[in-house]
Amino acid sequence: MASVPLTGSERRLPLGANDLGPTAPDERVEISVILRRANDLGPRLARGERSEPHLSREAFAARYGATTADADAVTAFARSHGLEVIERDLARRTLRLAGQASQVSQAFGVDLRRIETPTGVFRGRVGAILLPEELAGVVQAVLGLDNRPQARTHHRLFRPDAARAAAPVSYTPPQVAALYEFPAGAGAGETIAIVELGGGYSSADLSAYFAGLGVSPAPNVSAVSVDGAQNAPTGSADGPDGEVMLDIEVAGAVAPGVAIAVYFAPNTDAGFVDAVTTAAHDTTRKPSVISISWGGAESEWTSQAMTALDQAIAAAGAMGVTVCVASGDDGSSDGVTDGGDHVDFPASSPHALACGGTSLRAAGGAISSETVWNDGSQGGAGGGGVSAQFTIPAWQNGLTATSSAGARQALAMRGVPDVSGDADPETGYQVRVDGQDTVIGGTSAVAPLWSGLIARINANLGRSVGFVNASLYAETAAFNDIVSGNNGDFEATTGWDACTGLGSPKGAALQTALGQ
């Protein structure tokens, strides 16, 4: 039977990695196979330029899910290689397969290896995935064969530094919401989905934190297991617990009337995609906002994984779900050491609301200054720049990115971020993690902050605003324009820039604009 390479599935070994030999033949491997849609979303929906009402989850699944015939074809292929179908979800276009490494390797024409890097050992592969010719076009992605950690958190703990010229300050999330003039309300009746790829939360910590803020009743928080992952606190604020607790506490404090569903998934490309599709298509909890504070440089992803996750975020928007994503904490390089500029994904998805970072100071209950977050002593800066993967969306046509040297270049690809908010650990958020009160910053705080704002607006308007990017770019007066600072290679300027996007929110004005 002739085989063909799966487009965009090529993998390379990380620099400096050691090949420790083949994966044990009997190692259990679980993968996610993403199928094509029954119908193309089309350019209008694909860009998020929607004039029709949002589709219900049921209507979207019927029109744009996978077909039974395609799922049956892949099921037959899997079983012919001794693989088990452990999950089949046509709405999510996902088949979960499991089998021994030897069976999976033969089915997909890959050589699975044990790969050692400075951060640990993972199962990896090199080259492309192979499919039988009859499945070419039917299968759009095969994820999880390589189970390297795909994403990192975007939170930064505050660390005292006596050399700082300006004294550090910190805020509770409600104080930040007040400075950004959030509209009245608590988001009652809305659900915020939070994607987490590790760590966990303590219910006792959440109860103590919200009680300390005077939030009563506290938001209802529940954990949802994706691909076997669980709420599993590590006991360290430096690790993923800091991310998980920051996300929940910021979102819950600024929108205490919401329900919060935390979708825990493995930190792999398969886990990330499965978490987003599970949240977007959840017909029980029906979140209207998804908050994502994890990501990695575009260069660290396969094209098939980026396409699958971008399509998942596009689907969320078509169903009326706003997806807020942190833009990263490593400035214009996004932590890549090749000397070039990089942006973080999934923030660079044109269907995501990419959330960048500022440094926020206040006096007399109002903003006294706000600049780009770029703090060498704390080792972080707001992520932003120009995508190498995604073409420019219509709502960014005519915009330019300004370099720190003053050169202006018209955007030809997707610009990041779209919006921003306080992210500097020196002006960070007062939170509670693993029994300790601490201060945390990073663009990880901005995604749940914007998620809470969108939830408030949804509740107040009585409808979900869904994909908002095109609308926001037409409402620049509803933002605090950030015109000072840089994130490395890009400079803040009047209007949109590749450091802070359109700026930080004027919440009540945004509600008015989106309610028109």
Image (spheres, rainbow, N blue to C red):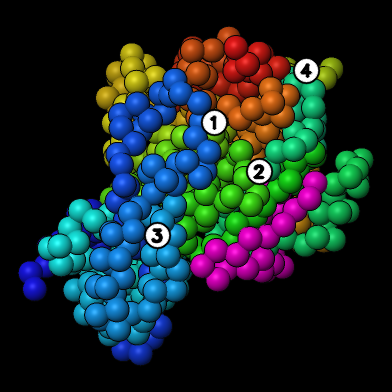
Q: Which of marks 1 and 4 is nearer the N terminus?
A: 4
| Secondary element at tag 4 | strand
Q: Which of marks 2 and 4 is nearer the N terminus?
A: 2
Residue 416 drawn above or below residue 60 = above
Q: How many numbered marks appear?
A: 4
Q: Earlier in the sequence, mark 3 or mark 2?
A: 3
- The reply to whether dot 1 and dot 3 touch (C-beta < 8 Å) is no
User: Which mark is nearer the camera, 3 or 4?
Assistant: 3
Give the residue type that dot 2 points to: Ile
User: Which mark is nearer the camera, 3 or 2?
Assistant: 3
Q: Could you tell me if residue 416 is visible in this image?
A: yes
Q: Residue at x 11, y 67 (%)?
A: 3
Residue 52 drawn above or below residue 124 = above
Image spot of residue 185 (x, y percent): 80, 27
The alpha-carbon separation of the residues under discs 3 and 2 comes to 23 Å
- The reply to whether dot 2 and dot 1 touch (C-beta < 8 Å) is no
Categorize mark 3 by other alpha carbons within 10 Å: few (<14), some (14-19), many (20+): many
Direction from residue 251 to residue 410 in the image, left or right:
left
The alpha-carbon separation of the residues under discs 3 and 4 comes to 48 Å
* Disc 2: which residue: 192
Q: Magenta segment, which residues?
A: 219-248
Q: Which residue is drawn at 79% across and 23% down?
A: 184
* Disc 1: which residue: 466
* Disc 3: which residue: 94
* Disc 4: which residue: 366
Q: Could you tell me if residue 355 is visible in this image?
A: no
